Amino acid sequence: MLANAPYIEYNANFPIVSNIVNEWRLEEREKTEQRIADVSFFNSYMRDKKLNTIEVIQLQSNISDLTDAFGKVTEYTKHYPNIFANVSRDIVLMNYMEALNNIIEKNPDVIHTDISEEDECLFIYFQKGNTKVFFNMFYDDEVEALINISTEQHKYTIEDSIENGIEQMSVILRNNTETSADVPRIFAA
Amino acid sequence: MYPEYLLPKAYYHIIQAKHFAENEDLVLIRHIESSEVKYMEGTSILHPDCIKFQSDHLRDLSTNLLGIFTYTDIFYGIQKESRDELCALWNEGSNVRKILPEEFFKDEGRQAYFIPVAITLKYLSDEVQSHKWHFGLFHTPTNCNFWHVSIRVLDENNNEVSQIETIKNNGKKKIWKTARDFLVSDIISTKELFYKPMPTECYQ
């Protein structure tokens, strides 16, 4: 494990409100404390990852994306607790970070354009050329991935755990890049 | 004045499913309330939030068939107090009354997206929850709009998804989410498409 893992500071990447606390800003203070806890969670997540130097460099280039996304997802967990059913907030955040980080690591050329919440799930939207990916995470008793991939030739739907889903998705994206000819639908659900 | 050409006439007939399949260049239009227009960040792809399958006893996406119904007709809406009567399904062969000025509104800030019928009906999916699904179109005229068409998500036996008891609720949500994802990625256009009206003999 390296000491220079790219931790984040309480800075502009995280929407930390002023630390000045007075009586009429008690509510703001609670929000601040939650955000500090979120940053601690993020740093702890990064610290626990065993990274080699290349991974650290790669991760540093993605850090802005990750922190922005992390800020968004923590907001969703506050505004839309109904999405997350029986799953704790820490598990939501951990799974989300694992998913986004793995996707970016395995597919550095995908463009991460959006994360959003819906009534029933949280999803990340990616594009790679003309390929469009909806990476949906459903929170029931456990977290399940539902990945919808639209390539020019085929439409794929993958239902699996987050880890397995990312593996299968990465193979489809890779195959689709290597040849735009007929890609076998090996992972079609 | 609410446009009279949108109202059902006693001599009209409900359009059969085969006419949607047989006629070329049919296009559906769906409005988005001005406050709800949303795109994927940095793209021109509509956000799935804009695709709302209404939940009554069946889940469907409410649209209108372009032809007699034109783009500017999306601006008309029915006031909440009158919806039960005017947005109820039309009884085939019956006359409907005129719509009074206080029963409707016009919102010119509404936007719209377009759904080509042929691509929608031919759309082939992967399995979700061990079910192949596809889109079905149903002509569902209401007392205020003969051109109302519902898009529903059906399984391989043409059962509407919310009616399938063997799929749990969470499973149904996954099927609808998949349908919405592919609607926005592959079918919907936010640019106006060329269209032809439904031939008169299909409904008169």
Image: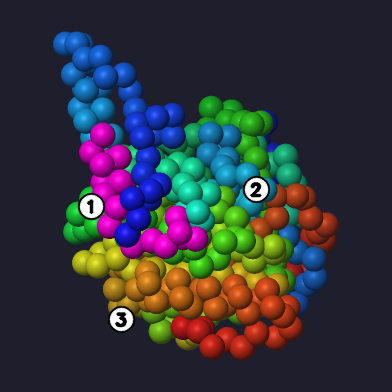
C-alpha separation, residue under disc 1 versus residue under disc 2: 31 Å
Determine if the magenta segment contains residue A40: yes
Is residue B91 at all visible to an observer of this figure?
no
Mainly helix, strand or loop, the magenta region? helix
Q: Which mark is residue A164?
A: none
| Identity of the residue drawn at 72% across and 39% down | B72
Q: What residue did someone put label 3 on?
A: B166
Q: What residue did someone put label 2 on?
A: B43
Above-or-below relation of A103 to A6: below
Q: Which mark is residue A90?
A: 1
| For discs 3 and 2, the disc positioned in front in the rendered view | 2
C-alpha separation, residue under disc 3 versus residue under disc 1: 32 Å
The image shows residue B180 at horizontal and vertical percentages of: 52, 62
The image shows residue B21 at horizontal and vertical percentages of: 70, 76
- Local secondary structure at mark 1: helix
| Identity of the residue drawn at 60% across and 55% down | A111
Above-or-below relation of A10 to A174: above
Q: Residues within 10 Å of mark 1 (few under 14, many from 20)?
A: few
Which range is magenta? A36-56
Q: Chain of mark 1?
A: A
| Identity of the residue drawn at 63% across and 79% down | A175
- Local secondary structure at mark 2: loop
Above-or-below relation of A74 to B16: above
| Identity of the residue drawn at 34% across and 31% down | A10
Left or right placement of residue B51 versus residue B71 in this view: left
C-alpha separation, residue under disc 3 versus residue under disc 2: 38 Å
Answer with the quarter of the image where residue B115 lies: bottom right
